[in-house]
Each structure stands twice: as structure tokens, then as C-alpha cells.
């Protein structure tokens, strides 16, 4: 089963260190079964894909999606 990884950031650090984030509680893992049910609303929100340069619509399907508090608010609206 596919698992999606998310990092939730209150504010964006200058540089992200995935090794330290993967050991923290900030890393959230969600099953693809849940994501598929909400795929259309999720695609409406811009999120960061692996770093703070790549902003995409929806999720980073093959890596870690980085979500700020503003992005989380947008997800909640949709």
C-alpha cells in the first residue's frame, strides 16, 4: 500500500533537513486510500514538493509534501 509523507511547518526554515524531519513528530504519513477519496479538493491547493522551490498543485506523489499553516488552512476549506 502506498503511503504519502507530509511535513507540517508553522514557518518555513531556510533549508530543510529531511533526515532530522523524518525523526520528528512533524512528519505525518497518510495511506493512499484516504488520499484518493479527497484527490480532487487536494489538487486545488499549492504545496511544496521536496523543497521550497518546487510549488505544485496537490501532492508530491513520489516524495515528501511540505505544507505550511496557510496551505493547511486552504486544504481545510476545500
Image: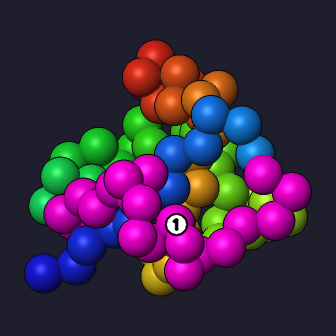
Indicate the secondary structure of the residue bearing disc 1.
helix
Residue at 81%, 65% (x, y): give it. Answer: 15
Colour mode of the rendering: rainbow
The foreground one among 33 and 4 is 4
Residue 44, x across and y down, in percent:
56, 39
Residue at 36%, 53% (x, y): give it. Answer: 25
Q: Which residue is mark 1?
A: 21
- Number of labels in the image equals 1
Where does the C terminus fall, quadrant-wise? Answer: top left
Q: Which residues are magenta?
A: 13-32
Residue at 86%, 57% (x, y): give it. Answer: 14
Above or below for 22 versus 29: below
Q: Tell me if residue 56 is in the magenta stretch.
A: no
Answer with left or right where residue 39 lies relative to residue 54. Answer: left
Where does the N terminus fall, quadrant-wise? Answer: bottom left
Answer with left or right where residue 31 lies relative to residue 42. Answer: left
Residue 9, x across and y down, in percent:
60, 43
User: Is residue 70 visible in this depiction of the protein?
Assistant: yes
Residue 32, x across and y down, in percent:
22, 65
User: Is residue 43 visible in this depiction of the protein?
Assistant: no
Q: Tell me if residue 20 is in the magenta stretch.
A: yes
Residue 33: image quadrant is bottom left
Answer with left or right where residue 49 lies relative to residue 23. Answer: right
Residue 57, x across and y down, in percent:
63, 52
Bin the neighbour count of mark 1 within 10 Å (Cα to Cα): few under 14, some 14-19, many 20 and up. Answer: some
Amino acid at each position: 500500500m502506498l503511503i504519502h509523507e507530509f511535513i507540517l511547518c508553522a514557518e518555513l526554515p531556510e533549508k530543510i533537513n529531511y533526515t532530522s524531519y523524518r525523526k520528528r513528530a512533524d512528519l505525518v504519513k497518510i495511506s493512499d486510500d484516504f488520499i484518493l477519496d479527497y484527490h480532487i479538493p487536494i489538487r486545488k491547493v499549492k504545496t511544496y514538493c521536496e523543497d521550497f522551490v518546487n510549488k505544485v498543485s496537490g501532492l508530491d506523489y513520489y516524495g515528501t509534501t511540505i505544507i505550511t499553516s496557510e496551505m493547511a488552512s486552504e486544504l481545510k476549506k476545500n
